[in-house]
Amino acid sequence: MKRIIFILLFLFLALGIGVYLYLNQRVVTIEQVFPGKIWAKPIENLPDLKGVGAPTAKNCGGCHTEIYEEWKLSTHANALSDIQFQSELAKPSSPKWICLNCHIPVQNQRETIVTGLINGDYFRPVEIPNPNFNIEMQKEGVTCATCHVRLDSESNQSYVIGGTGGTSPPHPVKINRKQLLDRCYDCHNETYTLNESLICSFQTGTELIATKSSESCSSCHQPEVRRSLVKPSLNKPIRTSHKHGFIGGGVPKTFDLYPDQIRLGYKPGIVLSNIKVENNTIEVILTNSNASHHVTTGDPERFYRLILVGIDRFGKTIYKEETTIGQEWTWSPVAKKVSDNRIPYKNSFLWKLDRPNLPIETYQFQAIHVRLKNITSDYMVQSSGYVSSPYKEQVEKMKDLYPHSSLIIESQYQLKTKSRKDTPLEELFKRNASRKGE
Ligand code: HEC
Ligand code: HEC
Ligand code: HEC
Ligand code: HEC
Ligand code: HEC
């Protein structure tokens, strides 16, 4: 009797361990864990494109020279080499394969193919080597093929998605402008809670839709220009084309990108509508006139810092006030939005201050668009041990290498004459190229 109980106990235990091991080693498909999420998988491996070869940006650039040069200066082209991205990617808490799905979104850019998740756990991907891995293309970040190249499942051939039509390319093309324009939403309009402290919160698309504007992201971020779509030697007609610099908040990823921001389409979202100095109060009014989404938008860490200083007749600063426009989040123990005073499209922000009783002759107002806070980059420098070469060395020097913010509005208000003088944007961007920190 005793023996039977022992055997039964043993069998029960073995079964338990077996079931435990089975459940814990079970490979679950990505679709089951992230149903309907486009960013959960890269775009499938793309075979060579007829008339082009490998679908790399560099190859596209062989003919589409100007578009390629513009794209190379974009944040998209820097989406992998971005020092901040590399620093965050290296954190042990980052599910790297998910991050890479939006920052290098084509399977050809990836060393491995993720075939499933052990026990459905996104920290335990099952990975096999990718036979079509292209190391050149990996470096290209959000490369041309992200938006433009797909696999025709019937012919098993790659083709280009175009938006113009009536053109004569040497490569297969299917015209679907809407698909091209809608592509932005896949990455720029996602809010998803992965776990308590890992939340992605990009609402730019929802913000645009709420304005009922008929504009697309590209209307502003890919300004129109008349030109040939390809290099002159191919003798193609002048057509309506779109700049591919994808300029956003005017804080580029490296200092040497500053000189191209305005040429490629940078415009501040906010406009200084008024500075009013009355008997007891000062009012500064900013209006979101240029961006059909909130400003700031996208990454929750971004904000505008507003600075008002008072200068006396000797040119000395005798008064200074600051405030911010943006979101505030706490990230631990759980990620949570604490406050949000961003400006929706066509709305205004009123900054009201008590007028100081000081011999001020001139007020100077500045708006600074901040992408990265000093305390955040301090922390990144401290934890650079997680990052591997060559990015480690860059993260260590990121205070010098990485633009944290840009000055986007500066205006002087003379009390006596009640006159206002705005510093031209070109001048501000010359200064930005050598401004460091927040
Ligand atoms: C060998 C030269 C060459 C290469 C390489 C090349 N293209 Fe083209 N492409 C052309 C020409 C020529 C046109 C047609 C221009 C015209 O008729 O005005 C064109 C047209 C296009 C169009 C517009 C089609 C339309 O009607 O909207 C897109 C989009 C495009 N190419 C994308 C790409 C992408 C992406 C790559 C790289 C994967 C690429 N091309 C590589 C020569 C090239
Ligand atoms: C596959 C994902 C993906 C798609 C699709 C995509 N983007 Fe992006 N975009 C990114 C990533 C990632 C970054 C930021 C990279 C970084 O900062 O390292 C970015 C950055 C930008 C920025 C720069 C913001 C700044 O201040 O520097 C703009 C503007 C932008 N995208 C516009 C667009 C538009 C317009 C479209 C559609 C035509 C689009 N994006 C489609 C992933 C995507
Ligand atoms: C009517 C023009 C307009 C449209 C439409 C528009 N944007 Fe913008 N966007 C701007 C302007 C202007 C800025 C610069 C804000 C600033 O620096 O003050 C901007 C900034 C951005 C930024 C940088 C955010 C920041 O605070 O640094 C991103 C990312 C962006 N836009 C993405 C998009 C996407 C995605 C869409 C479509 C869903 C879109 N935009 C539609 C005008 C527009
Ligand atoms: C983030 C998405 C995105 C990326 C990356 C991208 N494009 Fe485009 N491209 C578009 C969109 C959207 C349009 C259509 C704009 C419209 O019609 O309003 C377009 C249009 C074009 C056109 C048609 C002519 C024109 O200027 O409208 C060509 C050619 C082209 N792209 C080539 C390229 C090449 C080459 C690259 C890489 C160097 C590239 N694109 C990268 C989104 C992208
Ligand atoms: C759904 C697509 C998506 C995923 C997944 C994603 N990102 Fe991004 N990431 C973006 C977009 C879009 C931007 C640009 C946002 C903007 O400019 O407002 C961006 C920008 C960034 C930036 C630059 C922020 C800045 O202000 O310049 C960093 C750093 C970053 N991502 C890190 C990560 C890390 C780490 C992961 C994985 C935990 C990750 N991303 C996953 C889409 C994505």
Image (cartoon, helix red, strand yellow):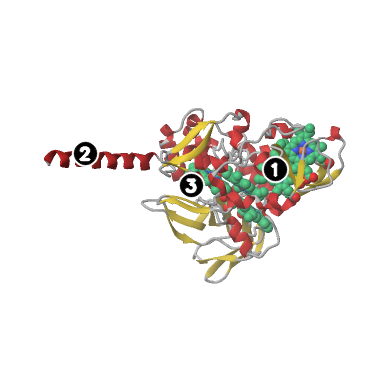
Mark on residue 148? 1
x 54%, y 56%: residue:
306
The answer to whether residue 228 is left or right of residue 202 is right
Which is nearer the N-term, disc 1 or disc 2?
Answer: 2
The tag on residue 113 is none
**Picture quarter containing residue 15?**
top left
Name the one closer to the observer, 32 or 320.
Answer: 32
Q: Which residue is mark 2?
A: 10
Q: Are marks 1 and 3 in contact (CB under 8 Å)?
A: no
Q: Position of residue 424 (x, y in %)?
A: 68, 51
Provide the residue designation for mark 3.
373
| Mark 3 nearby-residue class (10 Å; few <14, some 14–19, many ≥20) | some
Q: Nearer the viewer, mark 3 or mark 2?
A: 2
Can residue 263 be seen by looking at this rendering? no
Residue kind at label 2, given as amino acid type? Phe
In the image, is 63 to the left or to the right of 410? right
Where is 302 relative to 401, above or below?
Answer: below
Q: Earlier in the sequence, mark 1 or mark 3?
A: 1
Distance in Å between CA atoms under marks 1 and 2: 60 Å
Q: Secondary structure at mark 3?
A: loop
Residue 19 pos. (x, y %): 33, 42
Q: How far, Cα to Cα, is label 1 from label 3? A: 35 Å
